[in-house]
Image (cartoon, rainbow, N blue to C red):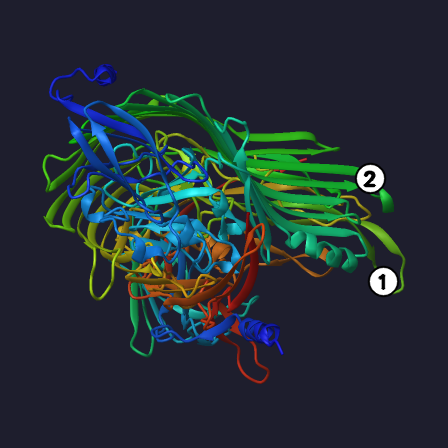
């Protein structure tokens, strides 16, 4: 009897058994917890706020649900004055953070601020940042493109900011925006009442798919144009038609940010795009928190409001 | 140009000091008996002395000796019976020598003192060649014999990931290899995302890889030159060979096309049939609505004609395509992805006189990658009739003219010189979208034209019995728009014979590379893009020093005859190498409607690298037991201002230890056994060590969509955070598990009435090692327990058995 086919079939079946296996490499999973900081200060802001969490080892049980540290001592200082930020619970999202009034420590352009955080287990981290000056946007450029997906066509709206970069200094920017829109829908006003066509107004933020940060590297003192952000509206279809479009107030924000803020936003944005792709070049997120992770950054916010008809 | 005029004066052989009085020249061609195939690299020498030369790419040799009554000249080549001729040296002689292929078990019958090229007697170092006959006996993945995979088994040459044909030579990336098929550059040597190379072994005559000590005639890439030559075609009779394997079949025909046997041709084709086998299944699954599949094919064709003793013409070409397709009648969609190379070479050999041989080549090479997508909606269900079509393509096309001269003025000198001009045309991306609503949308990143020109001269000088020196200079000029770079590339290789059969060697080479490959996968996808040197991206440059020992064991009591041992150490620096910036992705097609023009240069960053190591190779090319043992110990580091905070790091394919053992044993005339074992240190990877939530804030008042699309106001100071990874301080500080694998095969040969057939059974990864292809972090959900994250290793190939049927007539 010829056993060859049988042997080959067995080998193949043994071979196919789990090409995916869990491994336990040495070194991973033993990283100590680090303090994670998010604190962004601005002369325009009405609050000094910091959110403090902790990192978790990459392997093992997830404790992502409760990363906020509720009993940290958070101190901010400008070299002469200092203020301790108080623990607060966010009313909407329910997380713990630390806050103080800006009157207790005014945020002034050109000044350097230091943030110190210590937690009961003895860990202490510090970070510093310097507040940049204002840069105002000159105008907002709105355009639209027609796209087709699965045979359905819609018009998408985009906006870009244009401004003049101050010469002779290194600048980092972040752009953001919000707009009002209208949305035609059908609403049943009472449980048994008739369905009526209604026009709803809404407002939401722009989405920057190609990054919302930029620098004046190689373009110092020139006119800069941001990447484009997709305007907010309801991206649904009703009976093959597009029921929504931007209309009303349009607010664009130009943030002149410090280098820490820029790296943090840029790298977090880029890492989130590729972190699940095993073939992509991994993005390392820099931090200015000595001994910890996250960012203590400063920004100066300028606003431009227009009306979209 | 003045240099050229001077060199052309040498045509007459009248320059004093080079052409000696009282000499006689023996020149001619060495061919295979039976097929008349020109043989490359045949040793032509006076037995008992070190006076000799080797045949060039066209089988030509020229040897000038002191005039005398007669002398014995030997012709020997690996795998062939050597021939010794008594030649009258009172006058110049032209001759054609025919060598008969040696039988597999004939080693004891061969009595000549040199049956193979002796590594200790050549100035060249860091060169690897594997006879095609040996390649056909080495175990192959799914039965597809692959020359690039065999080269990966050599010291100093490493593979990238499991199963890939990408080649990493002495710390260089896969873009740093110049792969030339009959002088035409092959830009993407991969089929099926790198699992197979584009070269069909049946159509090839020779394969040679140079990884250091480059002679001046080679250039254009930093790390290696892989030169493949197609067979010319049998001039005597029609001959064929082919095979039927699990995934592909192939057929090669060759023979004379004129009665006077002056012209011959070769045609070779290969195609996979996975799509044909799978089509009925896919059709049945989708009620005939869907049709999808993948295939690749390639053709090689060559013709040559002998216009007498002085002129020969060769025309050869390659055409290969890979294609994925998916058609769905319900959705009216038709999507295709295709890529492939096309090359063509027209060559004219001219013999000016017995000492001067010239070849003029006109070369065309084209690599194209394309995506097509068509959708048709007939307007059912209240939706307007609509048709959309999208065409995306990228590629590179070269048109080139090249002239090479081989000049043999005296037994002490072999001079080669020549020039080449390549007109490159790069198409980084071209996109056309058309639909019934927006008419037509076209976006081309302008095609970029560039000219690369080179001139070279080299001389192999044998001042005495002990020394062999190859010195040369290559001048390269690259122009693109307003920028141009002129770079001299000095080359030097030396060998000194310490004792018979043992030489010490040293070499130095500067190399420049003007075309770059953007690849962020490292696995050889067809989306990898060739781009030129520009004002912002400088030419890559390497400098390499190598030293070594070469030993030929003529009759060792332990090893037997025909063994050669080489031990080499090298140090190589690389400048202006490029890499994608962190997080950059493949170019320009992520948002086809984007109005923004992105320069590809914005996505790349330049840095430097260095590599050093030692390599040992013990090789035997013929005999009942043949094969080799190779070991490499190496270190490679990169340093980029924009990567890893500017600190040096180990690139992904830095490999400390690399071992390969290849054995071929002719058990009998009918049975051949072979096995390979490879071991390599794991790839250097970046794996996160911790995770956290990265919180951000948004300017202004925040709104979010509430129930039924009604916006509700919230005003958080921070968002809920993005999950972020914290990596080790140093990039690529995690080492993948080591790679090792054993392959084996057995071939049964039988001579039938009209043909010879071979059955081959093989096992790839015989002991079923789970080699890592990539690692991935995943969350594991177990009921009743908290979620946890684990690191998973993904492997691609378990043990893979295969068989194939091959025939030859």
Is residue B368 at all visible to an observer of this figure?
A: no
Camera-side residue: B317 or B24? B24
- Residue B40, compared with residue B754, is above or below; it is above
Residue that carries the numbered disc 2 in the rendered image: B384
Which residue is more in the foreground, B131 or B280?
B131
Among the 4 quarters of the image, the one containing residue B181? top left
Q: Is residue B66 above or below residue B324?
A: above
Quick one: label 2, few (<14), some, or many (20+) residues within 10 Å?
A: some
Residue B627 percent across, percent down from the top left: 34, 59
Residue nearest the viewer, comparing A281 with B335: B335
Decide if residue B716 is on the left or right side of residue B556. Answer: right
Q: Is residue B417 above or below residue B613?
A: above
- The spot of residue A15 in percent (x, y) is 53, 72
Circle 1: is it few (<14), some (14-19), or many (20+) Cα within 10 Å? few
Taking the view exactly as shown, the residue that stands out farthest to the bottom is B784
Q: Are marks 2 and 1 on the same chain?
A: no
Q: Going by the image, does B790 lie left or right of B381?
A: left
Place residue B378 in its image quadrant. top right
Q: Nearer the viewer, residue A254 or B245?
A: B245
Mark 2 vs mark 1, CA separation in Å: 35 Å
Residue ID for mark 1: A190
Quadrant of the image occupied by residue B257? top right
Residue plotted at (36% across, 60% down): A104
Could you say where residue A308 lies in the image, as x and y percent from the top left?
65, 36
* Image disc number at residue B388: none
Asked if residue B298 can be seen in this view, the reply is yes
Per the image, label 1 sits on a secondary structure element best described as: loop
């Amino acid at each position: 009897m010829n056993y060859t086919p049988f042997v080959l079939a067995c080998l193949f079946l043994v071979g196919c058994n789990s090409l995916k296996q869990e491994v336990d490499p040495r070194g991973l999973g033993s990283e100590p917890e680090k303090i994670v900081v998010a604190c962004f200060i601005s002369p325009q802001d009405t609050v000094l706020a910091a959110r403090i969490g902790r990192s978790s080892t990459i392997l093992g049980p997830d404790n992502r649900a409760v990363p906020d540290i509720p009993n940290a001592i958070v101190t901010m200082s400008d070299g002469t004055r200092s203020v301790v930020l108080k623990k607060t619970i966010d009313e909407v999202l329910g997380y713990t953070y630390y806050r103080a009034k800006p009157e207790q420590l005014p945020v002034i352009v050109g000044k350097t601020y230091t943030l110190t955080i210590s937690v009961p287990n003895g860990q202490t981290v510090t970070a510093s940042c310097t507040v940049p000056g204002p840069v105002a946007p000159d105008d907002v450029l709105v355009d639209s493109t027609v796209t087709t997906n699965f045979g359905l066509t819609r018009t998408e709206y985009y906006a870009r900011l244009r401004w003049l970069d101050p010469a002779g200094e290194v600048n980092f920017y972040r752009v953001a925006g919000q707009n009002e829109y209208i949305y035609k829908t059908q609403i049943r006003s009472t449980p048994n009442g008739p369905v009526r066509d209604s026009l709803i107004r809404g407002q939401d933020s722009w989405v920057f798919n190609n990054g919302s940060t930029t620098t004046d590297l190689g373009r110092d003192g020139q006119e800069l144009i941001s990447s484009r952000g997709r305007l907010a509206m309801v991206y649904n279809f009703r009976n093959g038609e597009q029921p929504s479009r931007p209309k009303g107030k349009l607010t664009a924000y130009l943030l002149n940010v410090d280098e820490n803020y820029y790296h943090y936003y840029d790298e977090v944005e880029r890492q989130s795009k590729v972190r699940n792709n095993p073939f992509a070049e991994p993005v390392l997120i820099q931090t200015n928190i000595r001994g910890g992770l996250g960012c203590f950054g400063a920004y100066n916010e300028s606003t431009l409001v227009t009306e979209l008809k | 140009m003045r240099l050229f005029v001077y060199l052309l004066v040498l045509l007459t052989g009248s320059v004093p000091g080079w052409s000696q009085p009282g000499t006689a020249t023996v020149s001619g061609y060495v061919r295979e008996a039976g097929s008349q195939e020109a043989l490359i690299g045949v040793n032509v020498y006076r037995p008992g002395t070190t006076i000799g030369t080797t045949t060039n790419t066209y089988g030509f040799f020229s040897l000038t000796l002191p005039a005398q009554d007669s002398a014995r000249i030997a012709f020997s080549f690996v795998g062939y019976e050597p021939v010794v001729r008594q030649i009258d040296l009172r006058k110049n002689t032209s001759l054609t020598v025919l060598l008969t292929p040696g039988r597999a078990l004939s080693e004891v019958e061969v009595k000549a003192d040199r049956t193979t090229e002796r590594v200790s007697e050549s100035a060249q170092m860091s060169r690897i060649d594997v006879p095609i006959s040996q390649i056909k006996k080495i175990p192959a993945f799914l039965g597809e014999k692959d020359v690039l995979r065999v080269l990966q088994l050599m010291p100093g040459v490493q593979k990238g990931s499991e199963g890939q044909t990408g080649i990493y030579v002495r710390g260089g990336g896969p873009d740093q290899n110049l792969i030339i098929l009959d002088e035409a550059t092959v830009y993407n040597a991969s089929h099926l995302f790198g699992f197979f190379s584009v070269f069909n072994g049946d159509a090839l005559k020779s394969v040679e890889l140079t990884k250091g000590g480059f002679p001046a005639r080679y250039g254009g890439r930093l790390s290696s030159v892989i030169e493949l030559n197609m067979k010319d075609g049998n001039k005597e009779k029609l001959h064929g060979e082919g095979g039927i394997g699990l995934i592909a079949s192939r057929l090669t025909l060759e023979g004379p096309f004129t009665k006077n046997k002056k012209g011959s041709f070769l045609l070779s084709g290969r195609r996979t049939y996975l799509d044909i086998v799978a089509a009925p299944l896919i059709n049945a699954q989708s009620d005939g609505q869907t049709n999808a599949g993948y295939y690749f094919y390639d053709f090689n064709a060559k013709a040559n004609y002998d216009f007498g003793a002085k002129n020969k013409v060769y025309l050869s070409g390659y055409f290969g395509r890979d294609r994925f397709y998916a058609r769905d009648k319900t959705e009216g969609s038709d999507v295709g992805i295709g890529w492939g190379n096309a090359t063509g070479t027209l060559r004219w050999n001219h013999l000016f006189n017995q000492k001067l041989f010239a070849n003029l080549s006109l070369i065309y090479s084209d690599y194209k990658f394309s995506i097509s997508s068509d959708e048709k909606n007939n307007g059912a269900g209240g939706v307007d009739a609509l048709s959309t079509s999208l065409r995306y393509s990228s590629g590179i096309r070269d048109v080139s003219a090249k002239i090479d001269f081989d000049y043999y003025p005296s037994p002490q000198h072999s001079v080669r010189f020549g020039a080449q001009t390549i007109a490159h045309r790069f198409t980084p991306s071209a996109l056309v979208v058309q639909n019934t609503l927006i008419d037509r949308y076209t976006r081309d990143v302008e095609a970029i034209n560039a000219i690369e020109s080179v001139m070279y001269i080299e001389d192999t000088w044998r001042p005495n019995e002990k020394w062999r020196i190859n010195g040369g200079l290559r001048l390269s000029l690259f122009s693109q728009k307003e920028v141009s770079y002129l770079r001299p590339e000095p080359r030097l290789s030396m060998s000194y014979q310490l004792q018979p059969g043992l030489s010490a060697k040293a070499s130095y080479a500067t190399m420049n590379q003007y075309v770059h490959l953007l690849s962020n996968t490292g696995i050889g996808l067809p989306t990898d893009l060739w781009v030129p040197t520009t004002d912002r991206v400088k030419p890559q440059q390497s400098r390499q020093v190598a030293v070594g020992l070469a030993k030929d064991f003529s009759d060792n009591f332990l090893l037997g005859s025909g063994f050669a041992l080489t031990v080499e150490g090298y140090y190589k620096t690389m400048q202006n190498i490029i890499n994608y910036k962190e997080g950059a992705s493949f170019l320009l097609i992520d948002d086809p409607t984007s109005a923004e023009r992105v320069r590809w240069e914005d996505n790349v960053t330049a840095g430097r690298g260095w590599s050093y190591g030692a390599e040992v190779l013990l090789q035997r090319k013929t005999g009942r037991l043949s094969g080799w043992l190779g070991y490499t110990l190496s270190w490679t580091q990169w340093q980029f201002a924009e990567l890893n905070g500017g600190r040096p790091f180990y690139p992904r394919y830095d490999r400390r230890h690399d071992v390969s053992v290849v054995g071929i044993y002719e058990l009998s005339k009918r049975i051949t056994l072979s096995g390979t074992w490879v071991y390599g240190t794991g790839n250097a990877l970046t794996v996160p060590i911790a995770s956290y939530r990265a919180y951000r804030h948004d300017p202004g008042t925040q709104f979010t969509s509430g129930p039924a699309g009604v916006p509700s106001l919230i005003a958080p100071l921070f968002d809920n955070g993005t999950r972020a990874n914290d990596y080790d301080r140093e990039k690529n500080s995690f080492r993948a598990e080591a790679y090792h694998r054993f392959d084996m095969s057995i071939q049964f040969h039988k001579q039938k009435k009209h043909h010879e057939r071979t059955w081959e059974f093989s096992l790839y990864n015989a002991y079923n090692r789970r080699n890592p292809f990539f690692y991935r972090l995943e969350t594991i959900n177990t009921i009743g327990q908290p979620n946890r994250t684990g690191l998973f290793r993904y492997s691609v190939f378990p043990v893979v058995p295969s068989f194939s049927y091959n025939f030859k007539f």
